[in-house]
Amino acid sequence: MQQELATGIALGLLTVAVLSGVYWLNLPESEPEDDYGDLLKSAICIYALQGIVSDYHYHLWLNITANGERVEIPANVGFEYNDDGSVQFIHPVHTYDNSGQVHVETIANTTVTLGDFFAIWEQPFSSEGVLDYTVDDSHTLRMAVGGTDSQAWASQELEPYLVIEIFYEAA
């Protein structure tokens, strides 16, 4: 009776070991950890071009006003095109229209900054100026985030539903 019990336990343990080994060997290989700190060319392009939904997708609003006039943020900031005009790549921070709505679509929960958006747009942005508007003796630059003045400038983290306003004004 004890020998049968010992044999049963041994066979049970052997079965568990074999099944665990088969399970472990059939697990999908984990992807190497990518550094998504460089948002200028992240793996989001694969997702965007294949129509796969990104893991993190949110919107915010960016409004730039210069001397009392709204500055248009163009449609398709962050889109790169092939010679034939087809979309080759979509950056993880982009626009679809000129409304000021900015889309953030990443495959990893990563920090995205306002500086990242301006870098993708290939436009200057700092506390000293925005686009072609430079702070001088007669003009100032002010930024408000969610209605509160901010000095974060390019390091301002982008978050869902955030409203960022940049004002270039007479001093």
Image (cartoon, grey):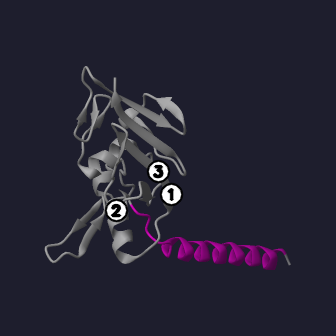
Q: Is residue 23 above or below residue 60?
A: below
At which x and y percent is residue 166?
40, 38
State the residue in front, 134 or 55.
Answer: 134
Which circle marks residue 61 in the picture? 3
Identity of the amino acid at label 3? Answer: Trp
How many C-alpha atoms fall within 10 Å of the one at disc 2: few (<14), some, or many (≥20)? some
Label 2 element class: loop
Looking at the magenta stretch, what is its main secondary structure? Answer: helix
141 up-or-down from 118: above or below: above
Quadrant for the N terminus in the image = bottom right
Q: Residue furthest right?
A: 1
Whether the magenta-drawn stretch holds residue 107 is answered as: no
Q: Which residue is mark 2?
A: 43
* Res. 83 visible in picture: yes
Q: Which mark, by number, is residue 58?
A: 1
Q: Spatial distance from mark 2 to mark 1, Cα to Cα? A: 17 Å
Q: Residue at x 26, y 72 (%)?
A: 87
The magenta span reads: 2-31
Residue type, mark 2 in image: Ala
Mark 2 or 1, which is nearer the eye?
1
Image coordinates of residue 8 in percent, x first then y, are 76, 78
